């Protein structure tokens, strides 16, 4: 029987959970929570970005009552506007991601395919909305390698689900502490007179050992109560959540974005030592579509994402389905 999961996972999960509560200066009475599951099995695949699990906590503020930013995002606070926002959000997310090559039954994986890798991380995103646009800063810290617990989790899940057990985790990336700082902005460029359609655009830039990239894109939405839900889209690059609906609203959306990537540890391999790696494709076009509903305080989002739909060689490794379930307490 494969143990669930390796002992390192418990240690780092406990450390990150303790960090989450210690850096939050307000009470533990959070305003909202979300749980997000990404998995390529939703689309009958099992390679590349194969699974991601994220739990998130949110603190809301309005006008004079702004949540206090934690020390995690202080390095980028200078870039935020020096004025009170209409709405502010302080969001924290703990997550685990895993990546595998196409052939998981080979003990010695193809060196020309994406390497096995697991990531366990903590993200803090601070968001300020000023009506027609929103600004965000984000810090991600984590560990990649065996200490992430990804090997034990995937083997355990595949065993209990009677799926093929991956054989090549012995060649995964080595343990390495990683980080990323991100600055972003989103605009609500247009809304129809009846409020049932809107057009959003956004851009962000990130730098770090986890990844350094520039992203830009736009989103078209159709539904109701759109004016109170558009700012959740700025959280997507941090993997804090999907778009979420609110106040009994719903909407369908389609996003198209472009990415310019300078470095990405999942592809490039470990930063300071030799490891499995493949050549990085620096430019990507991403397509995401989804449907979000809310009933009272509950919100559910289902979406499909292809992070490189124009590249046939790697597209199958970047397609996945994603589900977010959220609960708004106030």
Image (spheres, rainbow, N blue to C red):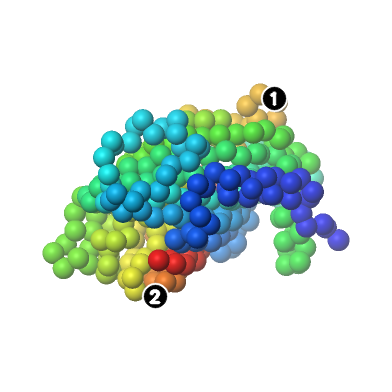
Q: Position of residue 303 (x, y in %)?
A: 45, 62
Horizontal arrangement in the rendering, residue 293 relative to residue 191 (left or right): right
Q: Position of residue 196 (x, y in %)?
A: 22, 67
In primary-sequence order, the first of circles 1 and 2 is 1
Q: Is residue 310 above or below residue 263?
A: below
Q: Residues within 10 Å of mark 2 (few under 14, many from 20)?
A: few
Dot 2: what SS?
Answer: loop
Dot label at residue 296: 2
Foreground of the two, 119 or 317? 119
Q: For residue 110, which quarter of the picture? A: top right
- Give the residue at x 43% y 49%: 90
Dot 1: what SS?
Answer: loop
Assign the N terminus to one quadrant of the image: bottom right
Q: Is residue 199 above or below residue 71?
A: below
Assign the C terminus to one quadrant of the image: bottom left
Foreground of the two, 185 or 309? 185
Q: Residues within 10 Å of mark 1 (few under 14, many from 20)?
A: few
Q: Is residue 176 above or below residue 202?
A: above
Residue that badge 1 annotates: 273
Q: Residue furthest left?
A: 193
């Amino acid at each position: 029987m494969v143990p669930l999961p390796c002992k390192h996972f418990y240690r780092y999960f406990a450390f990150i959970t303790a960090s989450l509560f210690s850096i939050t200066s307000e009470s533990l009475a959070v305003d909202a929570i979300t749980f997000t599951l990404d998995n390529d099995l939703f689309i009958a695949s099992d390679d590349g970005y194969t699974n991601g699990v994220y739990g998130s906590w949110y603190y809301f503020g309005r006008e004079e009552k702004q949540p206090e930013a934690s020390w995690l995002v202080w390095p980028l606070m200078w870039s935020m506007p020096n004025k009170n926002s209409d709405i502010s959000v302080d969001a924290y997310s703990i997550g685990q991601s895993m990546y595998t090559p196409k052939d998981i039954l080979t003990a010695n994986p193809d060196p020309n395919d994406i390497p096995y890798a697991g990531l366990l991380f903590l993200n803090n995103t601070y968001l300020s909305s000023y009506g027609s646009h929103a600004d965000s800063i984000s810090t991600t810290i984590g560990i990649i390698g065996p200490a992430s617990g990804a090997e034990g989790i995937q083997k355990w899940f595949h065993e209990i689900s009677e799926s093929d057990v991956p054989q090549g985790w012995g060649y995964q990336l080595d343990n390495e502490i990683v980080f990323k700082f991100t600055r972003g902005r989103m605009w609500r460029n247009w809304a129809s007179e009846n409020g049932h359609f809107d057009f959003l655009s956004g851009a962000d830039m990130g730098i770090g050992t986890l990844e350094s990239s520039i992203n830009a894109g736009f989103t078209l939405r159709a539904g109701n109560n759109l004016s109170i839900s558009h700012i959740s889209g700025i959280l997507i690059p941090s993997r804090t959540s999907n778009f979420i609906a609110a106040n009994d609203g719903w909407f369908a959306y389609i996003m198209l974005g472009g990415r310019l990537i300078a470095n990405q540890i999942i592809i490039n391999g470990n930063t300071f030592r030799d490891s499995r790696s493949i050549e990085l494709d620096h430019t990507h076009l991403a397509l995401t579509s989804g449907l979000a509903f809310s009933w009272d305080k509950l919100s559910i989002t289902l979406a499909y994402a292809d992070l490189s739909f124009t590249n046939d060689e790697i597209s199958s490794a970047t397609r996945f389905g994603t589900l977010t379930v959220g609960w708004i307490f106030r």
